[in-house]
Image (tube, coloured by chain):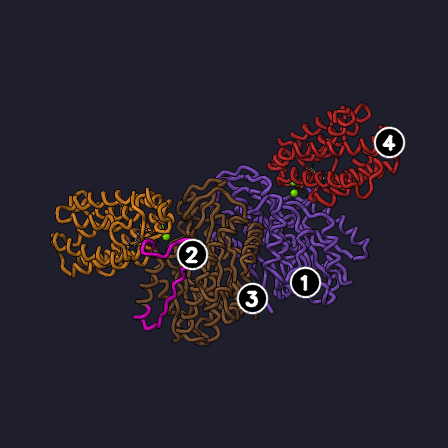
Chain colours: A red, B orange, C purple, D brown
Amino acid sequence: MRDTDFFRRWMDTATAAVEREADRLTELDSPIGDADHGSNLLRGFMAVRAALAAGEPAVASPGEVLQLAGRTLISTVGGASGPLYGTLLRRTGKELGDAAEVSDDALREALYAGVGAVAQLGGAAPGDKTMLDALVPGVAALGTSYRAAADAAEEGARATVPLQARKGRASYLGERSIGHQDPGATSSALLLNALAEVAEGAA
Amino acid sequence: MRDTDFFRRWMDTATAAVEREADRLTELDSPIGDADHGSNLLRGFMAVRAALAAGEPAVASPGEVLQLAGRTLISTVGGASGPLYGTLLRRTGKELGDAAEVSDDALREALYAGVGAVAQLGGAAPGDKTMLDALVPGVAALGTSYRAAADAAEEGARATVPLQARKGRASYLGERSIGHQDPGATSSALLLNALAEVAEGAA
Amino acid sequence: MLINSAETVVADALRGLAAAHPELDVDVERRVVVRRDAKDGGRVGLVSGGGSGHEPLHAGFVGPGMLSAACPGEVFTSPVPDQMVRAAAAVDAGQGVLFIVKNYTGDVLNFEMAADLAGEDGVRVEQVLVNDDVAVTDSLYTAGRRGTGATLFVEKIAGAAAEEGAPLEQVAALARRVNESSRSFGVALSAVTTPAKGSPTFDLPVGELELGIGIHGEPGRERRAMMPAREIADVAVGAVLDDLAQVAPADGPVIALVNGMGGTPLLELYGFHAEVARVLSERGVPVARTLVGNYVTSLDMAGCSVSLCRADEELLRLWDAPVQTAALRWGR
Amino acid sequence: MLINSAETVVADALRGLAAAHPELDVDVERRVVVRRDAKDGGRVGLVSGGGSGHEPLHAGFVGPGMLSAACPGEVFTSPVPDQMVRAAAAVDAGQGVLFIVKNYTGDVLNFEMAADLAGEDGVRVEQVLVNDDVAVTDSLYTAGRRGTGATLFVEKIAGAAAEEGAPLEQVAALARRVNESSRSFGVALSAVTTPAKGSPTFDLPVGELELGIGIHGEPGRERRAMMPAREIADVAVGAVLDDLAQVAPADGPVIALVNGMGGTPLLELYGFHAEVARVLSERGVPVARTLVGNYVTSLDMAGCSVSLCRADEELLRLWDAPVQTAALRWGR
Ligand SMILES: Nc1ncnc2c1ncn2[C@@H]1O[C@H](COP(=O)(O)OP(=O)(O)O)[C@@H](O)[C@H]1O
Ligand SMILES: Nc1ncnc2c1ncn2[C@@H]1O[C@H](COP(=O)(O)OP(=O)(O)O)[C@@H](O)[C@H]1O
Ligand SMILES: [Mg+2]
Ligand SMILES: [Mg+2]
Ligand SMILES: [Mg+2]
Ligand SMILES: [Mg+2]
């Protein structure tokens, strides 16, 4: 069973990963985007860290951790990734309800729902060269292990390189979007890798 | 004695020299000016060539050649160099009167007056890092030969390098104007060199 | 860059806006710029917003006859829903609020969330999506056409209608009609440098240009060797007119916006406009009104865009109506 | 560059100006831009001009309440006397004409020649020299202070007086008073690229800036490592205020112009203005009026200048008077 602290550590580890990788994410967002994905997520996750540290409003369950994180992302990120990641975490958190501890199965189910909400909100499908190309295979591999999920997401992010974008601003480029890795898929892989690290006790 | 054709050839040769050297003049005008001296003179001397070719108004004497050239420069160049070179040629032309042929002595006297008019109009003195640093020594050496005049002007232009500008826009730079050759002094040397070439029958 | 730090660029600009324009109510912290008299007169409220870096859009268009409020996001990043919710509350005088949204995934999602939240707060909200950029094919395979220069047409004309007291549904319908009557096409002669990145977002050598760009420093649909202004005008105006041909009346007059992307000197913009006017005249399109300048920019990008709006009598009358904002002022 | 060719840049821009502004009488061939109703009303004529590349100065300021005519030269090159003679003839309604001349050797010489010629044609001509740039020491060892941003103050305020029907001597005296009450200081963050040269006029690496620049792409008095906006404002406003201290009343309010050089985004200009306003407030200088934007530019140069004019009631009243030009519009 995973307790509230596990989810706090997931968000902390994700924040650290975004801090470390922000420049690379912005770099990836330059040739096929508007060069802000790294600074967007950095702003958002710094706010998540602050909100969780403040512990306000009282965060007493896994579901509340993710919902607070999601709301914070929505209120601080902007852009496409703010509402999408915000919805991912809020919806996942809502699915977890107010249980003090959740099973790995429950978390997997909840993440499924969260990813579904992202797909519905953004109208994208796998293959469109978006964060879903990392999230969908990642969450599908959760049945195996957290590490498998992280690896599948990482693999999915890399597999966006040859794709032509059909959603998000990279789609404006048409065929010129081919040959670049999607920044959102890359950050999604970071998020699932942070989860694996925490599950492995590495963080 | 120098006839009308001599003066036409002087202007033609000067025009050809400006065509050839325009880029260098603009280049010299970049670090200590506004990067237009070459295009300014090119525009002006192309108009002089056209005006003389049109022969209109009837240009029947050395004095009229230079006055037409001077008026044309004033009406087409603009900037600091337009009125200054225009005045140089107009005043020199006026001094020559309407004689059909003029002696080398008369030309020297007239150029003296022309350079004096430039000094008066612009308020500059030798050593201020302007065209006068080429014109004054150049015209002074006319007593020796046209070639000596051209060489002295060329020497005077080169000697502007270590000077600090006190007139024209290079003066805004203060000490930073030191170390660059003055574009106007350089074009003045071209003008006197064109005169020497024509006198030597090289053109 | 002329900044204190990348992190404070937007807040600093809002402080400067507040200092320069006492007639605006600028909430620097919460990033909402409101016309001081927004609630007087019982008008429909007009709220727009989007990433910063397109100045004077949108904050420069807040004032009598145009927007009631603007919500600036981070540079090139859509604002967050909290901003629009706050703006809606600040301008709603009971007549409802129109959100003017440029069609980018981020803007659409954030405004959508804001509309839901504002609705829950009891504000009647309508939305209009601006999607005028003909460089993007509007299909299942893209996020749809981008919103660019026509945003100015929509904000000006809808703003005039709201100022006259038109009800929400009518202002919204008018805004949609303006959008549907408008098309744009943009060209970049240099990449853009964002404060966060500090270097050009992509590599565009001198002597090449990008055709079909947006306003976020993204590359366009196609790269070409540099062309003279007259050929660029042929391509840009041609693309706009071909697409506009579907809009009735096919031979009506247009309002023309020749817009600088920020880094192109006004001297060049006017020269470019000479060519735009030539193409329009060659194609038999009467130009009823013209605007040349930097209105919907992309930071320091060199380049320009052409926007045309087919305008009937009503649209022209509303276009001519008085406007008093920081960046657009005429009449009265 | 967005041009047809370096040779046609100015002519092309004038064609575009004519197309965009039917209220102006634009002689493309002879390079004179005249307010159509210049001779109606028997006002004093106001003529200015200078090299192109500083747009919207001067042509953008032709119209009711400001200039009667403008004479654009080649890029960064003073106009030729023929232009000003023609402009004087076009605007003189018998009340005489004021030439507003920025203090550069070329402008001074060409306007001087024009004044002589126009005088011979029977036009009463007065001249005012604008020399507001405190970066240049006004001494025997320079060509004197440059004319930069204060030109806008002079043209606006003298234009308002002329519009009200003030006689030539009074308009000229007022213009001189505005100039004497005004000071400016400029900063470059990049060099400028002229159409004729096609590459930056000097080498200014990213991460360095030039202090004390003019508006012709020339380097400044000093090069420094890049500074944050707040320090640039300290230096620029400090230099202006220290020099302005000699002008009475030493504690009066000022009109502030925070001017972009062309290549700096408006977002950054407003952020810079926040710092300018801070310095002014720290030094106890009340700001009566503010203008932030690209008004006296240097083509695509990144950078800005600060101009301050110490204004009494009369100057403020004339500043506020209606103006209807392409680039400056308020009142009425
Ligand atoms: N419709 C969508 N569905 C899912 N993900 C999307 C969608 N549109 C964009 N994204 C993701 O968002 C990322 C861009 O995020 P970001 O740069 O922060 O926002 P913006 O594109 O507004 O600048 C893309 O790389 C992509 O993965
Ligand atoms: N007061 C002056 N007296 C004599 N020559 C001058 C004076 N001012 C400038 N010059 C000359 O003019 C040259 C610059 O000419 P040009 O570049 O065509 O004009 P501008 O300086 O107006 O751009 C300088 O190099 C200098 O030789
Ligand atoms: Mg982005
Ligand atoms: Mg020069
Ligand atoms: Mg963005
Ligand atoms: Mg010049």
- Residue C238 appears at what percent x and percent y? 56, 49
Q: Is mark 2 within 8 Å of ligand 2?
A: no
SS under mark 2: loop
Q: Which residues are magenta?
A: D118-142
- Disc 1 chain ID: C
Amino acid type indicated by mark 1: Arg
Q: Is D124 one of the magenta-colored residues?
A: yes
Relative horizontal placement of residue B151, taking residue D103 as reference (left or right): left
SS under mark 3: strand
SS under mark 1: loop
Give the class, few, some or many, for how many residues have Cα within 10 Å of label 4's Cα (few <14, many ≥20).
some
Q: Nearer the viewer, mark 4 or mark 2?
A: 2
Read off the residue under disc 4: A102
Q: Quadrant of residue A54?
A: top right
Q: Is mark 4 within 8 Å of ligand 1?
A: no
Q: Is A116 one of the magenta-colored residues?
A: no
- Disc 4 chain ID: A
Read off the residue under disc 1: C36
Give the class, few, some or many, for how many residues have Cα within 10 Å of label 2's Cα (few <14, many ≥20).
many
Read off the residue under disc 3: D330
* Mark seen at residue D133: 2
Amino acid type indicated by mark 3: Trp
